[in-house]
Structures are given as C-alpha cells and as structure tokens.
Amino acid sequence: MSFTYEFARPALTVDCVVFGVDEDDLKVMLIQRGTDPFKGMWAVPGGFVRVDESLESAARRELEEETGIRGVFLEQLYTFGDVERDPRERVVSVAYFALTNLIGHNVDARTDASNAAWFALGDLPELPFDHAVILDAAIERLRGKLRYQPIGFELLPDRFTLTQLQRVYEIVLDRDVDKRNFRKKILAMEILKDTGEVEKDVAHRAARLYGFDKRAYDRMLKQGFNFEV
Amino acid sequence: MSFTYEFARPALTVDCVVFGVDEDDLKVMLIQRGTDPFKGMWAVPGGFVRVDESLESAARRELEEETGIRGVFLEQLYTFGDVERDPRERVVSVAYFALTNLIGHNVDARTDASNAAWFALGDLPELPFDHAVILDAAIERLRGKLRYQPIGFELLPDRFTLTQLQRVYEIVLDRDVDKRNFRKKILAMEILKDTGEVEKDVAHRAARLYGFDKRAYDRMLKQGFNFEV
DNA sequence: TGACTTAGTGTTGTTTGTACACGATACTAA
DNA sequence: TTAGTATCGTGTACAAACAACACTAAGTCA
C-alpha cells in the first residue's frame, strides 16, 4: 500500500528528551539506533507520527516502545525543521521533553527495549542528526522552567525528603542552594504535604517524607504566584 | 506531477499570529479566506510548508504573500497537531508569533493582499479551525515574554518616547504601570540610547526620542540579567 | 556512651519593589 | 503677552523579598 499527494510532503517525527537525576548527575535517556543512517549511534528516542494519532500520543507511544517508559511528565519543546537536518530526506521533528524518576525507570527493569541507557550530561556520546541541538534546547528549557514552576517533584519518587528536592535543584541548576532559604521558600508555598512518615534504613537521623499536593498547587495557580529558587 | 510515500503523511503548515499596538489596543492581523473550507472567514495567515524551505522561511514567505508584512520579529510558538483540527485531512501546523510596528504596516499601504486587516482583541470575528486556541497561546506567550525580555520595542517605530513604550506595556499587560518606576527600571538596564532628538508637532512639551541599543543588549544577555516591569 | 552523620531551625543586613506629587517645558488661544 | 493646558521628567520613604550565615537535635554505629 502507498499514499500519493499532489505536493511533496516532509516526513514528520517526534523526539523525546527524557531527563532523570541520580545522586550526583542530571541524566538523559538515549537509545542505540538499530538502523541506518547512523546505525549504532546513541540518539534521542523518537519516530514517525502516524496520521491517526496526535503529536503527544506519538511521543508517548515512541517513548514506551523504545524505552519502556510511560506515564511521565511530558511537554512540547520546539519543532526542528531545518532542510538539511536529516541526510535522507526532509524530516521535520516535533521535540518533547520529559521528566521522570530515574530510580523507578531503571534500564535493567525494562524488558522490551534492549538498548536504552542513561547518560550523564557531562559524559555524552556523539549524537546523530541535530540531536545535540535538541538536547541543548531541552536543558535550557528545563533550567528555565524549574525556576518558576514546581516541576522538581517530577524527577523524584512520590515521597521525598526536602534534602532530596534541594539536591534536584542543585543538580539541574548546577549551583549550591542555601538549605534554610530553600526550605523557607518551598514550605511557604504550601504545595507540599507532610506524609507524617520518615525515611527508613538510613545511618543517621531520618528526614520527614513529603509529597506534592496537586490540589493546593492548582488552587495556587489560579491566584497567580511566584516560584523561584 | 505527484508524490508517493510508503506511509500516509500529515500535511504540514505554518500559521503566523502577528501583533501590533495602536493608541489603545493590542491588535492582530487576520486575512479573509478565499477558499474552502471556511471560505470568507477571517483567519490567521499561514499556508503549506514546501519541502525545500525551513519552517521559519515558510512562515516569513506566507506572511509576506498574504499580508505584505516582512522583516518582522518572528518566533516559533507551538506546534498544533490534534487529529481533528482540520476537517479535510490530517494537518499539523507550526505556529509562529510576530511583532510589528502597526503604524508602519498599515493595511492600506499594501498592494498584493486585498483582504487583510487588523482586529482589536476585544473585537474578534469567529475563527476557523483551532485558530482561537492558537491565538490564545500567542497572547499568553506575548504577555509572558514581555515581562522578562525586552521585546516591547518590536511593537514601536525605530524611535520612540518612554511614554509610548510604557503605553505598549500597559496595553499588552492590560494594567497601569507607574511612570517613575517604569522609567527608573528601563533606563537602569542601559539598553536604550538617547537619540538626542525630541518629538515634533505635538501640542505640548516634546518628549525625548530613544532607540533600542542592540549592542548593549547583547552584552547584557551574556552576563545574565533580569527584565521585569 | 561517645563519635559521626544528616535533619531541622531564625535573625540580620541588603536589595528590590511599590506608592506617591509637583515643577518644568512647550504650545495654544484669547 | 499672558493665562491656560497638556505632557515631560524627576526623588523619597516604606514594605517586601532575598541572601548570608551556624548551631542544636535526633538517630546510627562501633
């Protein structure tokens, strides 16, 4: 079967830049390409958009097919459409960026994608197409967004300590954050709920566990707010 | 001549939301559709992307073809790709938003586009496709961007008074701005250069004319800055 | 039980934001 | 020529937000 049009059409793809943080690094999930061009190179996961699915659906589908990741925070980033960005033919790509709890999406836990892996930003392989540009745009967006919207939670498990959250900010923004000022500010927003529980199995005083209070956050959005670390 | 592909491809278009301000209103340029679907309705200018031009080139080309406007500030906004957004077939549209000096682009001055016009935001006609959604996204982006990036100039002639600039902010943000605080802040940034000239033909004390100092602005960008009215 | 590790907490000085009013300048019209 | 009128251009004081900074509390481990 084939499809014929009066005018030439660019191919349309989606690409997903997935971020996670571990103890020390901001990491990106890449997949190893199984086909030419650039066979064997590590690339940002993505693929062609089908005519019967929305862009976001396509992004989520490709992400799950190639990495096993699902149900993550996903947001459109930018659309890359330079004429020469793909050596084969004209391909326009709608890029998304995603945030996930790296611990919950360990590569070993997946079954279907045999060649996906997390890479620290300081230790990236060479990337095909314009994926380096896409990745840079995603990092810039993540940094910008973290400052004025509470998305740090998306990079953590459901329950987390304030120190963990602070660490996310430090890793993403790549600078130290003052502990007392951070806590003062984040608690004043009243978008965290104290779960009443504490850490387990730590070799020191256990910290309180907090969760993100989406209801309080939505209430807050309506009144206009400022969120900046 | 026709083009055949193994898999069905969405059509790809660009749409441009062009803003201008006059004495009292934020305005948008719309064109009257000459073909079905929605023939006769006012819509955001746009059209199909050719395989040999980048997205931004396509946006600029369509803008000039349909409205005569060229050389304006143009920035990618968002890509709209819902399956049902066009009744004919699957069409994905990369939306741009543009800022221009409305005075310099009066509709009467154009020759090639017979049916383009400025509409105040409070006085919009019904729009086809998802153009109302696109327009809302553009307005939100304009408001957000104006607060932390110096783009107010793009809506004014090369030389302007501080009162005119303040008026742009008031119109776009839809609230009053304090005159002394505004001047203090905007002059402290040192991105305006005093042309040494003053208004002509006004029935009161003439105001100084300023221009945007791009060199100073670029220097500033490198150091990181904060721009908020 | 003493040493170690991280949790959790307030105060102060500095910077930034916000509210606010009047004399100066240039034109207009009597 | 002069009184009237319209906009230009300027400074201060109070309030809020930000930034820097160090110690005690709680729990684990040897």
Image: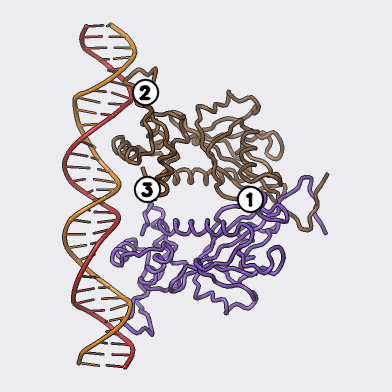
Chain colours: A purple, B brown, C orange, D red
Pick the quarter of the image with the C terminus of chain A. Answer: bottom left
Report the chain holding disc 2: B
Check whether the beta carbons of the residues at disc 3 and disc 1 lie within 8 A of each other: no
**Residue at mark 2 shares a chain with residue at mark 1:** no
Residue receiving disc 1: A81
Direction from residue B38 to residue B17 in the image, left or right: left
Give me the residue at 54% from left, 71% from top: A118
Element under disc 1 = loop
Q: What is the distance, in whole Å, between disc 2 and disc 1 at their CAs?
A: 44 Å
Whichever of labels 2 and 3 marks the residue nearer the N terminus, that label is 2
Q: Nearer the viewer, residue A6 or B207?
A: B207
Give me the residue at 43% from left, 59% from top: A146
Across and down, in percent, residue A202 comes to 37, 83
Element under disc 3 = loop
Q: What is the distance, in whole Å, between disc 2 and disc 3 at their CAs?
A: 29 Å
Residue receiving disc 3: B226
Q: What is the distance, in whole Å, between disc 3 and disc 1 at their CAs?
A: 31 Å
Residue B198 — which label?
2
